[in-house]
Image (tube, rainbow, N blue to C red):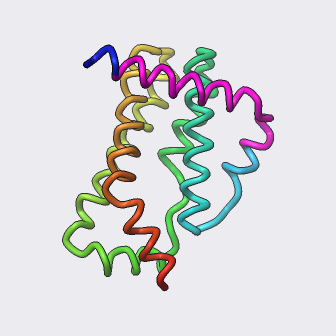
């Protein structure tokens, strides 16, 4: 079971690496720095940063890892209007929802610190926490939040 999970992660990471490699870093940076409080734009920026992080890991490029991790940790926040809609619909679940964001945020900060220390083993361990945090949040909330934001 553990081998299957690791194999799956390796395949996904390889795909991301190949995709990122095909992109110009300038276009990635333009996407990352595009200011917007639209949740979909924020999520797309996080995806680009995650691709950049994956590329940095595969290339053992600690500067790229640190940049991507800091971008993830300090991503733009949704607009007050968006947050109001989400809070109104999630009510008691907001703590869990925010917990996923904090899990990703804290792991990304630790990745940046580990990258500055060139500790690839720690970076990879924390990378899994970021991916797990994102995936858990998406599994639980993506469809609901998409419907909430489309309805209004």
Q: Residue at x 40, y 37 (%)?
A: 130
Asked whether 52 falls inside the magenta stretch, the response is no
Magenta stretch in the rendered image: 5-28
In the image, taking residue 40 as reference, residue 2 lies left or right, namely: left
Q: Picture quarter containing residue 122?
A: top left
Please provide percent x and percent y for residue 23.
Answer: 76, 34
Please provide percent x and percent y for residue 86.
Answer: 38, 74
Screen quadrant of the N terminus = top left
Residue closest to the eye, 114 or 130: 130
Q: Is residue 29 above or below residue 11?
A: below
Q: Residue at x 69, y 52 (%)?
A: 33
In the image, taking residue 144 as reference, residue 19 lies left or right, namely: right
Q: Residue at x 73, y 43 (%)?
A: 29
Asked whether 6 falls inside the magenta stretch, the response is yes
Residue lying furthest bottom: 152
Main secondary structure found in the magenta portion = helix
Residue closest to the eye, 41 or 32: 41
Q: Residue at x 41, y 60 (%)?
A: 142
Q: Picture quarter containing residue 26?
A: top right
In the image, taking residue 97 as reference, residue 10 lies left or right, namely: right
Kindly tell me whether residue 101 is visible in this rendering.
no
């Amino acid at each position: 079971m553990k081998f299957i999970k690791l194999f799956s992660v390796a395949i996904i990471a390889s795909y991301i690496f190949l995709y990122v490699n095909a992109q110009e870093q300038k276009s990635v940076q333009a996407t990352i720095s595009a200011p917007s409080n639209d949740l979909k734009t924020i999520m797309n920026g996080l995806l680009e940063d995650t691709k950049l992080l994956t590329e940095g890991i595969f290339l053992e490029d600690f500067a790229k890892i640190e940049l991507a991790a800091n971008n993830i940790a300090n991503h733009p926040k949704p607009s007050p209007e968006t947050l109001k809609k989400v809070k109104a619909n999630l009510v008691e679940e907001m703590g869990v929802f925010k917990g996923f964001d904090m899990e990703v945020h804290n792991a990304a900060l630790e990745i940046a610190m580990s990258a500055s220390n060139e500790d690839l083993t720690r970076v990879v361990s924390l990378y899994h926490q970021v991916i797990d945090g994102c995936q858990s949040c998406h599994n639980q909330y993506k469809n609901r939040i998409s419907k909430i934001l489309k309805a209004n």
